Amino acid sequence: MSKMNVPQTMRASVLIAAGRIEVQNRTVPTPAADEVLVQVSAVGVCGSDVHFYQDGHLGDWNVSEPLVLGHESAGVIVAVGAHISDSRIGERVSIEPQHPSTTSAETLRGEYNLDPHMQFFAVPGTDGAFQEYVTIQSHFAHAVPDQVTDWAAALLEPLSVAIATGRRAAFAPGNRVLITGAGPVGLAIAQVARSAGASEILVSDISAARRETALRFGATTVLDPVTDADSIRDAGVDSFVDASGAAAAVRDGIESLRPGGRAVLVGMGLPNLELPITQIQNKELWITGIFRYANTWPTAIALVARGQVDLDNMVTGTFALDDVEAALNSTSAPDTIKSVVDPRL
């Protein structure tokens, strides 16, 4: 293994149980032959991190042993495994936080995000990036140019969710798009739709503050899902994306589609939901979900480097490793868009 001057121990913010986080000293991991060691410079706080922290579970995943949260991350390569060129040491990278099987049917189809044996940062069984150093397979440490900041490099992860969504929604020039939910992912999706040439981008959210924010990040029109419900249902859009997880938003969004339109469900809400089956059949609507991403980082890097997507101005607060709990709690504040943890502070 080749490396820079790397310490033997590091600090890690560890979820011990629901509502309980401790900063611990741990051994710096050694990269496997196909891996690199990254000194972490920025980690975005995601809603999934908040769920694990508050509830101790998310969907079918339960925190049964200590877990390091954080999967939106970036940093600098400080060591490489035996099979990786030393030339990568010192490279600034954005981390694609997954390790799929190389031989699963899903990976061989190019849909490695659907691999049932996936090891994913900050999901029980695999530690995340709220720590000073992490390892990742070399091909999932994506080099970023100088014009992509550390914050933006970390937030290429939620942008990748938005890019995967845009591909499924078939965003195209002149399209009319409805996005329900103006959280970080909704705002990223709005920017992806704008970069694809959508002519109208309607964004709905129950929060007036978030609606105002959406106008700065790609929305052409903002709507209140309660008072503007009729306008939403009658919109006749080409694509509808739900980034809220709210049952009413999904139902109204499906109704908003033109015949042959596409619905993409991104937000995590109820496990089961009643759908307007007659409309889906009569209008031949396409409805699908999004589970992470595959092959999105080159597009994400290009969009940010060219100034077509603004991630830096989505950051509304930065926190040290000692303050991860405050970072997680900050997401409930109405003026928070995206909080970032810097383990170097």
Image (spheres, grey):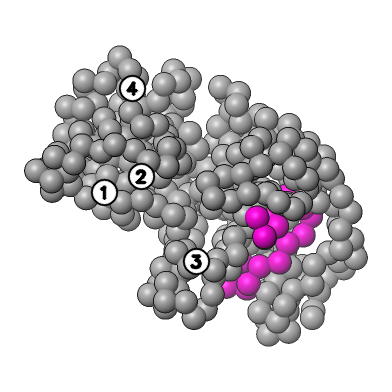
To which residue does mark 4 refer?
A: 225
Give residue 277's position: percent from left, percent from top.
18, 41
To which residue does mark 3 refer?
A: 116
* Label 4 to label 3: alpha-carbon separation: 36 Å
* Amino acid type indicated by mark 2: Leu
Dot in front, 1 or 4: 1
In the image, is residue 69 part of the stretch drawn in magenta? Answer: no
The C terminus lies in quadrant: top right
Answer few, some or many: residues within 10 Å of disc 3's Cα (few below 14, many 20 plus, some between 14 and 19): few
Identify the mark at residue 287; answer none if there is no mark. Answer: 1
Residue numbers of the magenta segment: 124-141
Which residue corresponds to the image point at 70% horizontal and 57% vertical from the top-left? 127
* Amino acid type indicated by mark 4: Pro
Q: Is residue 242 left or right of residue 298?
A: left
Q: Single out the residue that lies furthest toward the top.
A: 227
* Amino acid type indicated by mark 1: Ile
Q: Of label 1 and label 2, which has the lower sequence position?
A: 2
Which residue corresponds to the image point at 63% horizontal and 73% vertical from the top-left? 138
Q: Of label 1 and label 3, which has the lower sequence position?
A: 3
Question: Circle 3 — which element?
Answer: loop
Find residue 315 and report its image quarter: top right
Which residue corresponds to the image point at 58% horizontal and 51% vertical from the top-left? 61
* Label 1 to label 2: alpha-carbon separation: 8 Å
To which residue does mark 2 refer?
A: 265
Asked if residue 267 can be seen in this view, the reply is: no
Q: Is residue 69 left or right of residue 211?
A: right
Badge 1 vs badge 2, beta-carbon distance below 8 Å: yes
* Label 2 to label 3: alpha-carbon separation: 20 Å
* Label 1 to label 4: alpha-carbon separation: 21 Å
Give residue 129's position: percent from left, percent from top.
70, 54
